[in-house]
Amino acid sequence: MPQPLSNDLRKRIIEAKMRGDSEDKIATEKEVNKSTITKLWALYRETGSYEPRPNPNGRKPALSPQQLEQITNKINEHPDITLQELINVLELPVCVSALCRTVNNKLGFCFKKNSARHRAKSGGCKGQTRGMESNSARNGYR
């Protein structure tokens, strides 16, 4: 696919067209196709600018800003609500894993385990606590 025209070249083409130069003359001088000049001139007449149109490609978000606000409100009202309950109550068009990523990354919530369920302690330290040590101390360099 060819490279898009620079804004400088676009500007020079429009200025030449405004001076009254023919499309054939501009095409040979600027080394562009005649159809490019026609499309650029139509863009300029339509928008008043020679800037390229924005590219609307890419994946659209599955959840609207209103739905994100509803999720935030529901989590604030019921902090112990599960993701599946959120999907069912708000009738969201996403799966549990997608909602989990949204809640964690976009909304900034994190999952905190119940404090009553502690993990079993490892027998490795035997009462001694090891603090943070630098990489050089761990590798034998002091």
Image: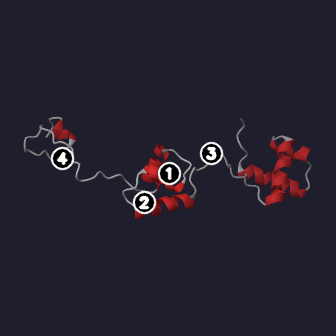
Alpha carbon distance from label 4 to label 2: 36 Å
Quarter of the image for the N terminus: give it.
top right
Tell me what residue is drawn at x 52 percent, y 58 percent: 68
What separation in Å lies between label 4 and label 1 (alpha carbons)? 42 Å
What SS does tag 4 mark?
loop
The crowd level at tag 1 (other Cα within 10 Å; few <14, some 14-19, many 20+) is some
Q: Are marks 2 and 1 in contact (CB under 8 Å)?
A: no
The disc at residue 87 is 1
Q: Residue at x 48, y 51 (%)?
A: 102
Image spot of residue 62 (x, y percent): 57, 49
User: How many numbered marks are there?
Assistant: 4
Q: Residue at x 75, y 49 (%)?
A: 9
Residues at marks 3 and 4 touching, judged by CB atoms closer than 8 Å: no
On screen, residue 86 versus residue 124, left or right, reads right
Residue type for callout 2? Ile
Looking at the image, is mark 2 or mark 1 nearer the viewer?
1
Mark 4 is on which residue type? Answer: Met
Disc 3 versus disc 4: distance between alpha carbons?
A: 44 Å
Check disc 4 and report the residue beneath it.
132
| Image x and y of residue 116, in percent | 22, 52
Q: Amino acid at mark 1?
A: Ile
Task: Kindly identify which residue carries mark 2.
Answer: 75
Dots 2, 3 in contact, CB < 8 A = no
Element on which disc 1 rests? helix
Q: Secondary structure at mark 2?
A: helix
Would you say 52 lies left or right of 139 here? right
Q: Which residue is mark 3?
A: 58
Nearer mark to the viewer, of 3 and 1: 1
